[in-house]
Structure formats: C-alpha cells, structure tokens
Amino acid sequence: GRALAPFSITVTPCDVPIEWSILVYKPPPGKAAPGKAFGLPRQRQRKHNLVSTIFNYKGNSVETYMGMSSHSALYLLEFLSTERDTHITVYLTSDTTSGHLYPELPGDPRIDVIGVGHTTVTLAWKHSPSVLQHSEGIQYCLLVNEKHNYKSLCAAETAIRSSGMKLPPTVALSLSPYLLEPQQVMILSNSELSIINKVSSGEVRQVCMGTKNTYTVPNLSPNTQYYFDVFIVNLLTNASAAYTGTFARTLEEPEPKVTELKDGKVVHVILDGKKQKFYSLQYQARHKKIHFTFQLCRGQIRVHITRNGKTVASENLSGLRYFSLKGKLLDIYSVQLRSTEESNSSVKVLASPHFHKPLFPLLPESLKIKSFSKLRTCRSVTIAWLGTQEESKYCVYRKRIEEDQVWRELQSADRCSGPESRHKSEKVLCKYFYDLNLQRAVTTETIKGLEAGTLYLFDVYLFGPSGIPVRYHSKVVKTRKKC
C-alpha cells in the first residue's frame, strides 16, 4: 500500500444553508485512476461500487472535514444550494501543520462585554491558539452593526453586497481578508484599520486590531443596541474563524441640567469639550420684547434658542452677539449651548427685557486694533481703535512677550476676562471718548517707554455702562531694532 497523506477541507456558507458532500472514487485494484473518472455516467460508477460518499453536511455553519487521502483515489466535492444562488468559500490544504490550517478558536470562543458607556462599548475575548503559536499574518477583526450577528466574515460581506451597496475597492479588501494580496495584507496587519459602510440596515463597521484581544468601540450612538462579531483571520491563507457574537446596548444620554436665567443677571457657562458638551438654560419672558446677549470667552460654541419648542435662532457664536426677540408674555425660551471643539469653551449669557439698561457696552464696527508700521520707533508704537456713539471708557494694557509665546498668548486668551486679571505694571492708560459721527469715532495712542527690537502684546478694554468689559482682539507689535 502507498502512504496516506492527511488533508483538510473547510467550507463556509456565506448566507443561506447549503448541502455539501465529499465523494471518493477508488479504481479497481491494478488500474490507475482514469483522468476523466467523473466523466463516466454516475450510475455506472456507483454500480461498480467505485464511488462512495465519505462526508455529508447540511446547514449554514462553517464545517471542516479532516481525513487521510490515498494517492490512487480521486475526490469530488459536491455543493447544493436549495434556497437560491449563494456564495461559499472553500479552503483545502494537504499541509496540516498548524500554520496552514484554519485559524483556531479558543476553547471558550465567547466575547465578553467588559464596559458600556454612552458612546462606547469595551470588548474582550480569549486569545486564539493560532495567535499564540505564530502571530505574524494573523489578526483579529471586529464587525459592528445594529441588525444581528454574522456567522462568518463572508456572511457580512454578502449582506452588504445584497443590500445593493457598491463596495469601494478598499472596503471589499477589508471586509474579506481572502481577497487580499500579500503586500496589502501587511499594511492591514500593522495598523488599525476602520471602515464604515452605510447600508440600508444601518451601518456595518469593521476594525482590525492586530493581535490585541480587547478593544473599545468608539463613536456609537447613545441608547442603541449593537451586535459585535470578532473574527480571527489568517492573512496568509485568507481563512477566518468566527467567535460567538455578542450584543450590548449603549447607555442613555444624561439629561443636561437646566439653569434658570433671571432678568439682568449674567450667567457664566463653562463647557468641557470632552465630558460636558451641552448646557441648557431656560428663561420665562415677563415682557413681549426681550434681548439675549452672548459673550464668547474662549473656544467655539454653537447656540440654539427655541421659544415654546420652536427654533428662533441657531448659529455659531463669535465675540459679542445680541438677539432681540419678540413674543408673548410668559413665553418659555430654551437656550442650548454646545461646545464644538475638544478643549474648554466658555460663554457669558444674559437675558433681559428690552427697556433694561444694557449691561454690555455698545460695540464698535470692529474690535480690531490697528498699528501703524511707519510710526514705529525703537522706543514707541502707535495704535488705533474704533469707538462708538456713546461715551465709554477704554483702557490700554501692554505686555512683553517672546517670539515662541505669541501663538499661545493669542490662543489661550480669555476674551471675557477684564483688566482685573492683569498685573498693574501692564496698564498704560485709560481714556474716555465718543463721536456722534461713526466715521470719526476712532482714536490713536502712542505708547512710549518701550525697549528696542522687542515684541509687545497690546490689549484694549471697552467698559459698558455697568462696568462689564469687552476686550478687543490682542495685537502683537515689534519695536524697531535700530533707529
């Protein structure tokens, strides 16, 4: 007798159940297996007992057959789909050393949900023996969707295809590792790759995370059920095995706390861009005409104002912004503030009836400070700024800074903080002025006693009738080096 060689065949149905069989043709003793054995009419082969079925399976699970082949025998695989046209993947190998076999699942192939947040879910699973034996070319991939779990990677891919979505080439690659070519494989296995597919059934998201066996899924929606499937993928043989899928529901978004706005009282709202992104204020109108004033202190904030549930204003704030609104007595106004960046943002909010004396000053056309390059000397700088039609107090401050501090100073400035936050030595002067003709409401000031070739940061504060300051945009000017 000739030596027997081991072989294994793994079949993955990609959507509907199928039936498959392995038939073996053994020629009568003394005859070599004819090249066209299966060209013979089936009945004649069967009659000679030359053909026997050695394996048969019905269902839609991944199934593996391992056996020994003799050199004189011929094998035939038969597949039958009873429901409809379908996809399957077939993997055959005669090299049964572990590197070429299907990736193995651990004894306990469950996925544990170890943490749930409003927009995140953290998962962990036991390592596959394949990863522990040889990690190169092997990695974990995770699928996330809102509909159901998938039994295999190709089942997920088929679902996306059948939803009528055209897969961009990169997605086709990422969703089925068995389409990968070796050079693309390596790119995938080194870095985490995340692809989101919008399909009719919500989105299917896939992330490959190398050989890490825990992962926190980010950017989920609050109070939503998600299904998670982990696959162990051998990128060299294109084979993948599925852990037992799991599901989890994200937490509900906490109700933002609501602060009452009182007539003429300024509320300072600080939004931490990471944890507290929203802030709600409520105001009940005791007059028909009311004003809302917003002074953006730092960061970026979007404001959304509703009256009795209907939107009356929605925009991104900058500087000082007034809204004059007209409604009925006892209307309920709701003000929603949302930070639109990661760092801290803050804003001052004021609601008042229209006849209240304004707390914030009347603003000029522009809050820019102009410096006259030609009038610069080694010891002095000349600046100008616009005023308004009402007499107001303006104070000028200066501060020496280094080249590398400019950007930080301009970025970190709290636009609501008044001169009280400044050192006394930085104060240059205060003056009052106004002009009924707006074209002429401009003032200039020459600031002396500076050092040559030095950078200075200039600030102008405008004080309103109630003493609330508004700060102009800081100006950086350098004195001349040589005169």
Image (cartoon, rainbow, N blue to C red):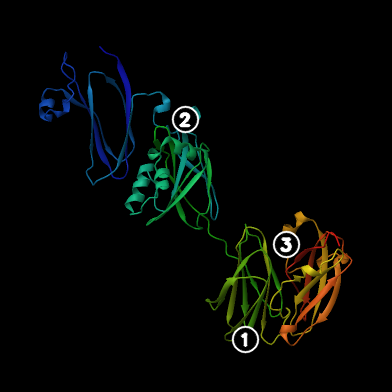
Q: Are marks 3 and 2 in contact (CB under 8 Å)?
A: no
Image position, residue 210 (x, y; %): 51, 38
Of 90 and 253, the residue lying toward us: 90
Residue count near mark 2 (Cα–Cα under 10 Å), binned few <14, some 14–19, many ≥20? some
Q: Which type of secondary structure does the marked residue at label 2 adopt?
A: helix
The residue indicated by pointer 2 is: 129
Residue type at tag 3: Leu
Residue 402 relative to residue 228: left or right:
right
> Could you tell me if residue 109 is visible in this image?
no
Residue type at tag 2: Pro
Which numbered disc covers residue 410?
3
Q: Are marks 1 and 2 in contact (CB under 8 Å)?
A: no
Residue at image x 75%, y 54%?
404
Residue 340 relative to residue 100: left or right:
right
Image position, residue 289 (x, y; %): 62, 86
The residue indicated by pointer 1 is: 289
Image position, residue 38 (x, y; %): 16, 28
Residue type at tag 1: Lys
Asked if 84 appears above or below 140 in the picture, the reply is below
Q: In whole angstroms, how far apart are the C-alphas of marks 1 and 2? A: 72 Å
Residue at image x 30%, y 40%?
88
